Image (cartoon, helix red, strand yellow):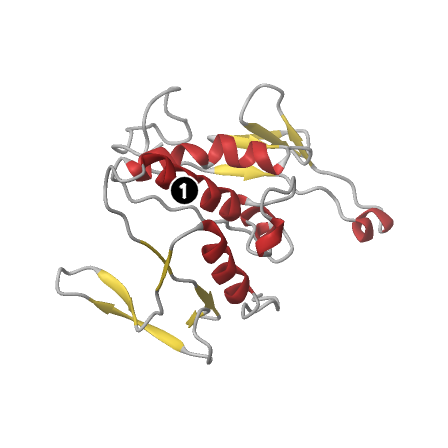
């Protein structure tokens, strides 16, 4: 949800239904085979019916959304991201980003590794699902209003901004525009007319991403 920031006491979540400017969702990644072979065990528990995780059976932390290791991709998208699309069409700026260490599952959750033909698969991540819903809504509205959809794709790696839609490696810089806002200078931007075109740009840009650890 997007709206006025709520006033919340430190350490407490706002009452259910209150609109807040920023929400935090936590997703638990399952152990991978190599971790299981090494004898690793899960240290996080999810409180049933509550957006809460318990660390080591002792400390509890509450978020806006908590998704266990068994939560399907569709449920993550439907509960944490899809409502933002309605806010977007209502005129709000909306942003979704994944934060976590290397190997924590960011790429899988966001879906930046998806190919054009993979959209609609059960393992499809947030971005392809959002793109599909975006154009479904645009097509549903028909000629009610004029719309232009453009896509850009950048990566911040080791403090450098890389334009992933540029055919040649290019490092971009931040600049202030005439209105006093901060923009990424010389960032490529392409107009797209359907989900296939946007996912094609996603696939091309993803192929240029840095995959090594930043730690």
- Farthest bottom residue? 168
Q: How many marks?
A: 1
The quadrant in which residue 1 appears is top left
Classify residue 148 as left or right of residue 130. Answer: left
x, y percentage for residue 173?
A: 32, 73
Residue drawn at 51 percent across, 50 percent down: 99
213 lies left or right of 200: right
Where residue 155 sits: x, y (%)? Answer: 46, 65
Of residue 157 and residue 137, the one placed in the foreground of this image is 137
Quarter of the figure that contains the C terminus: bottom right
The reply, left or right, for residue 6 in relation to residue 53 is left
Residue 68 in the image: state x and y as whole percent.
Answer: 64, 33
Residue 29 figure quarter: top right
Q: Is residue 114 in view from this perspective?
A: no
Which residue: 50% across, 48% down?
127
Q: Badge 1, how many Cα within 10 Å: few under 14, some, many 20+? A: many
At mark 1, the secondary structure is: helix
Q: Which residue is mark 1?
A: 134
Q: Nearer the viewer, residue 125 or 59?
A: 125
């Amino acid at each position: 949800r997007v709206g006025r920031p709520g006033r919340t006491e430190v350490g407490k979540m706002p009452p259910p239904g209150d609109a807040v400017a920023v929400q935090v969702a936590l997703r638990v990644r399952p152990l991978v085979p190599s971790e299981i072979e090494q004898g690793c065990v899960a240290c996080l528990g999810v409180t049933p019916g509550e957006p809460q995780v318990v660390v080591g059976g002792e400390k509890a932390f509450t978020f806006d959304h908590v998704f266990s290791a068994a939560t399907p991709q569709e449920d993550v998208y439907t509960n944490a991201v899809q409502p933002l699309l309605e806010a977007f069409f209502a005129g709000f700026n909306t942003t979704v980003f994944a934060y976590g260490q290397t190997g924590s599952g960011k790429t899988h959750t966001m879906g930046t590794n998806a190919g054009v033909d993979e959209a609609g698969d059960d393992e499809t991540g947030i971005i392809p699902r959002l793109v599909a819903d975006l154009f479904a809504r645009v097509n549903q509205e028909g000629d009610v209003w004029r719309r232009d959809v453009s896509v850009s794709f950048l990566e911040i790696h080791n403090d450098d901004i890389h334009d992933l839609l540029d055919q040649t490696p290019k490092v971009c810089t931040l600049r202030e525009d005439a209105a006093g806002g901060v923009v990424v200078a010389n960032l490529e931007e392409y107009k797209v007319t359907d989900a296939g075109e946007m996912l094609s740009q996603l696939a091309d840009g993803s192929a240029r991403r840095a995959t090594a650890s930043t730690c």
